[in-house]
Image: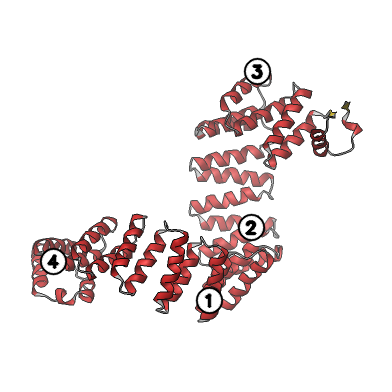
Amino acid sequence: MALESNERPDQPITKFESMLKTDDIYFFDAEDFEDIVHHYLNNGKISLAKKGIKIGLQQHPDAIELKLLNIEVMVFENNLAKAEILLDELQLLDANNEEIYIQRANILSKQDNHEGAVILLHKALELSQNSFDIYSLLGMEYLFMDDFKLAKESFMKCLDFDEQDYSSLYNVIYCFEFLEDYEGAIHYLNDYLERNPYCEVAWHQLGKLYYIEKMYPEALTAFDFAIISDDSFIGAYFEKGKVLEKLGKYHEAIENYEITINIEDPTSHAFLRIGRCYEKLNNDKMAKYYYRQTVREDPLLDKGWLAITNFYSKHKLYEEALENINRALNIDGENPLYWKKCGKIHHALQQYDQADFAFKQAVDLGNYELDTWLEWSEVVNKVGDTLSGVEILKQGKEFYPENLEIRYKMVAFLLMLEDFINARIALLDVLKIDKDLKELYLLENQFPKFAHSEWVKSVITDSKKES
């Protein structure tokens, strides 16, 4: 049985869903179908949106807007060839419809032709009465092209249309930050806040920018205004806590982190921050408690495991530190930072074979930090494999070719091996960089017998003659 829409007083979406559950067929205006489809698209319910389009086109086969929504779904689902065929048909009927150019631009964007998409979007702008959405799309295309200046300008135009468009506001600030124009971003946000003094999002973003610029009092003020604007804004309390940490006000920082826990479910990041504050306050009992809470809340948060491991290592409780880092490795054995920390602990426990294995794992998994190479080479040297120590330092030198600590250590290892030819070559190479011998202490501190040997003095003299 077919019913007219005015026989049902419910809203179109409610009526539509009721129709899907029964054998009744309700007639809707084309505009109602558009609202129904937009509702489902906005809520990510694609299958229901497609049903709305199908039934809508059955009742209104000539409705161009429904056809365009059909094309939009096709583009979303990467059915691009069919979408282009339908666009060609529509363009013959309505050549000045900006939505046709928008959908063609979306297709080009999907094909990574962002320059072509921009051209079509500008064409759509010429035809559009309401360009807000088009500027948003333009901004995204410019982001894809890494043109952050034009992207910023496009998102600013979105805010000219709607100052409550926080997505565009975030994008504007993102562009400023990428361009490293923090001063410009601060100026822009202050102007924005002159017009929107109770915008918690803008105050929050302004506070983060002041934090980056190390303007901590100004950052605190900004976060306070964000909280005044919305006293349940977790992000503002959390960022305010970070500023208070920087200022050494650890008790106040803890209070702000605890507020975030009380407003919503606790987060591992809040527990971690509270633990660090207690550690700074030398309250080891509470620090340990919150570090434990961190890894319980999120066992995959590497910063949590590293914090509790560092806590025990700092107190030279290496067995406890090893127990915790091994737990972390059982959860994520592919984490190079865990393996590096494991190597350091084994080194401290004089378990050199295990330390060697751990450092090798760290490097194999992509940890190429300077201290990794230096400590790994020390470990293998301590087990008498000085030659491997030289090879490790050679690898490290590839990543840090100008680092003198690696170079001086390599000289010392070669002298241990009594490889005087390569030791001389290596030392002369170092002296080309360290001409004034300002860094010679790196050799003196660790290997005084070599640093003060006649052999080294002779090479230094020869180097000065050659220069």
Distance (Cα) linking label 4 and label 2 = 63 Å
First in sequence, mark 1 or 4: give its number.
1
Q: Which residue is mark 3?
A: 92
First in sequence, mark 4 or 2: give its number.
2
Residue 248 appears anywhere in the view: no
Q: Quadrant of residue 392?
A: bottom left
Q: Which residue is mark 2?
A: 202
Distance (Cα) linking label 1 and label 3 = 70 Å
**Residue at 60 percent of width and 33 percent of height:** 77
Give percent across and percent down for residue 3: 88, 28
Q: Which amino acid does the dot numbered 2 rest on?
A: Ala
Distance (Cα) linking label 2 and label 3 = 45 Å
Q: Which amino acid does the dot numbered 4 rest on?
A: Leu
Pointers 3 and 4 in contact (C-beta within 8 Å) = no
Q: Quadrant of the N terminus?
A: top right
Q: Which residue is mark 4?
A: 417
Q: Which residue is mark 1?
A: 287
Give percent across and percent down for residue 170: 60, 52
**Residue at 57 percent of width and 58 percent of height:** 186
Q: Secondary structure at mark 2?
A: helix
Q: Which amino acid does the dot numbered 3 rest on?
A: Leu
